[in-house]
Image (spheres, coloured by chain):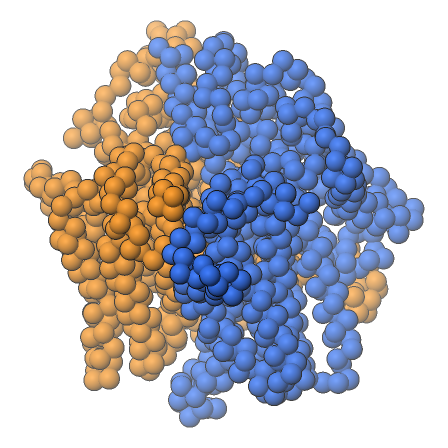
Chain colours: A orange, B blue
Amino acid sequence: MGENNESDIIEHHVDEEMEKKTARCHAASSPLLESSPSEREGRSGSSTQSSHRLLAYSDALISIIATVMILPVAHTKVEDNEELRESVQLLLTTKIAVYLMTFLIVTMAWAAHIRLFQVIVRIDDCLALLNLACMMLITFLPYTFSLMATFPENMLGILLFCGCVMVMGVIQSVIVVYAFSRPFLLNEQIQISENQTFYKQHILKVIMRVPIMCFFASIFSFIFFPLSYVLLAIITFLPYISQCLKWCRSKAIGQVEDTPDSMVFYTYLPNEPLSKERVEAFSDGVYAIVATLLILDICEDNVPDPTVVEKQFGGSLVAALKAYGPEYLAYFGSFATVGLLWFVHHSLFLHVTKATRFMGLLNTFSLAFVGGLPLAYQLTHEFPRNSQNELEAIQISCVIIFFAGIFQLSIWVVALYSEQETLHPYVWYGGREHVFMLAKLALYPCIALGTFFLTCILSKFSTSIFHLMEITVPFAFLVLRLLVRVGLAILRFIFCPNRSNLTTVVDDDADETRVPFNAVVT
Amino acid sequence: MGENNESDIIEHHVDEEMEKKTARCHAASSPLLESSPSEREGRSGSSTQSSHRLLAYSDALISIIATVMILPVAHTKVEDNEELRESVQLLLTTKIAVYLMTFLIVTMAWAAHIRLFQVIVRIDDCLALLNLACMMLITFLPYTFSLMATFPENMLGILLFCGCVMVMGVIQSVIVVYAFSRPFLLNEQIQISENQTFYKQHILKVIMRVPIMCFFASIFSFIFFPLSYVLLAIITFLPYISQCLKWCRSKAIGQVEDTPDSMVFYTYLPNEPLSKERVEAFSDGVYAIVATLLILDICEDNVPDPTVVEKQFGGSLVAALKAYGPEYLAYFGSFATVGLLWFVHHSLFLHVTKATRFMGLLNTFSLAFVGGLPLAYQLTHEFPRNSQNELEAIQISCVIIFFAGIFQLSIWVVALYSEQETLHPYVWYGGREHVFMLAKLALYPCIALGTFFLTCILSKFSTSIFHLMEITVPFAFLVLRLLVRVGLAILRFIFCPNRSNLTTVVDDDADETRVPFNAVVT
């Protein structure tokens, strides 16, 4: 009776997970789950659970931590003072570099977390608690890194940073060992495979690589600390660079990679699959925290003190709030921009069936620029009207929006390269949704570029142009489908004037003349 | 061909959604989806999408905004100065009241959002953009409310607040009208029903009730503003109070409610179903932002300035960081507590099959206390050792943890009352997981209570006791299952000593003697 009940629990949880993530677990039932109750009995009675919510919570935590280092940048007071300008600009540049590096490092930790939980698809209480300990260390990483950046010659920063990374490595190894000792927690692919020990050793080897390098870096920090930085830089960038080169070479020569399909975990290949669900959850977290960063400041700082209102504004609250006017505008502007960029991201990933590591990397770059948006918007209202600084702030905003949009567009282009695997059929190159999606993705980069050049030419009206842009864009998205149809009709009218009366069947034509994207570009 | 393609798209998205949310949409295919392509053609060609990610993003935004008003409270400087103490305490009390009210108001807006998107289960681009506009207004609500609280005699606050609520009401009405004009966006239950117009009018009536009351409140603010506050209070609390009374009465008399099953939307009944998925997502957001609030402060404020380190600490970074020591401790303490409360919440909702509005309300109360945790932990390190203030801060922390835990426990008790509908069979009263779950939920309240009374008696060692508690709890969770087994064995040994050698079959006994919870308590 007891045993029966227990297998009921497991089967129920498995069923639940199967329903939710049919894409992730293809085999509906595996031999290990059906049989060997004695083996299950040995796991001190803890029941297995779907890892869905644990991962969602981890994604939320990591996305908040990744974007948080923008706050020290945003709160740096930039005064309109020529004397201090140089030193403030230097400080700002340092802080921005710290922000970007932290973002990169945290997303690397996040990618490692994804890889780990693509192998381990079910959890129990013990794994959940171990994961929380791991999360605590990840959230502490930005602080240690900013210590390292502020005191580059002090070895304490390096030691703390390396210490965090090493402890994280140990916890991850413990998780792997624990999960492999309870095979029903693992991915079906590994569960049914015969050489589990090989997988375990391979994964442990990959996981321990970084902590071991960090261990050497922390030892070198006692002897000759520049060497530690070199080592840390190698850890950070080498996998990307070597894999990029390898991938480019294989693409150029056209050589087929002979990795067996079962070894698709922990390969560092750019086309290694990345859980699409988690990329979405992480992006949602970043967009959400970025959209609300300005309102956090407003809620805290912009409620005037009653005594100040009484003394300085003669009791008129409206007059007191008028002083904050530009900040509200900045808030609504940044919220709308972030919201619409999220909307584009959402539309894009609606059409994606499988995310790869390379797409994830491009997504990270896009998100890093999105994280800079509140800063840029805050800058636009800090300077007096028509000053050189204000113009620069507006142009920086345009550049940030442009890059955030361009990287989204590049995700789309990369997805098109292997459209059969990564995209829904109806958005393949030439498919009926293809042009519309392209227009959605191209709207922000185009508008940002246009605003940038307009402000260069008509620098006197830069603020008005920028605000006009902010107001127009949401409506542009609303009527975009109409605009695309009109645009296509006009194009058709220009290039094939004799078929201009056939615009209603435009989609059918597009479908009939559809060719694979690869064939077009090669 | 074009039409075929389009229905492919819809069917694909529908399939995708069905897979993900089988619980929400029972009917796998509805007549309206299969047929009437002409009707679909009328919707200006926009493709429908699963609303899953839009809701996840909205949940993330709303949860951040709900918890954000704790920041002004946390950043109020509490000095150890007897003179200022009274005024600071008053300020703190006001801010805490503002925080709790904002939390309640924002969660009400969130509940309205859930209700709306339980009726509308598929979205298109237009709905996504309208929803983003709605989100922008919700994120602005806390600010208008804190203006209202700081300047209670100024009508600007009321006007802004009511204005936001009214515009939100209008947007929601537009969403409803839009969705009912495109029935394939609606819930299957409404889609196949014949009196759609009735549903539409009922929903619009419920939605518009609050904005209309706000309209009157804003008019009264010109005439006699206390009346506006009364009106706003009625809007906020009346539905809860009236429904609570009604529910209690019906429970006491035992009268069966005769609401037809199809009218389960927009009833305000405490047992109206609430999307479990969204309650989880919202809770995850709150737990994540609360866990990271302290590290946000640490990252921004606790990286010392190099010149300060040079001058004040003779270049010793370790000495400079030692000054911040207690803050790191507070961070790790609050992260661990929030993380473990999340862990308990996660275990609880793993066993829940259906969430109700009443459970959602209890969850909100629990989350409101969780939101206060970083504040309490921050207070614990701000005062000199062994001062009266420090003791108070530690006791406040214990009280907050206690209430956060007690409300989680009450969710469990409420779920047990209708266990057949809301819980998995194996955790029904007396089921094999029941005792373990109860122990998990009771651990934090018990420990918090114990620590509270210990600090009352041994006030000199309060800090040590508190830190010891922090370190012990994670390990207590790790070995909880073992502890429960030992505890049960001991209980059995005491009450049925003649059966003490049968402890191994404890589960079988529990199963055989299992009775419904309702039968036990009534």
Quarter of the picture containing the C terminus of chain A is: top left
Residue B296 drawn above or below residue B213? below
Residue B261 sits in quarter: top right
The residue under the point 86% across, 41% down is: B219
Name which residue lies at 44% across and 64% down.
B486
Apparent side of residue B161 relative to residue A108 in the rendered image (left or right): right
Image x and y of residue B337, in percent? 51, 66
Residue A232 in which image quadrant = bottom left
Residue in front for this viewpoint, B222 or A456:
B222
Query: Considering only vertical position in the picture, is A50 above or below A309?
Result: above
- Residue B38 vertical position relative to residue A345 in the rendered view, above or below: above
Residue B155 picture location, percent across and down: 83, 52
* Quadrant holding the N terminus of chain A: top left
Determine the residue positioned at 23% across, 74% down.
A215
Farthest residue toward the front? B498
Q: Nearer the viewer, residue B491 or B248?
A: B491
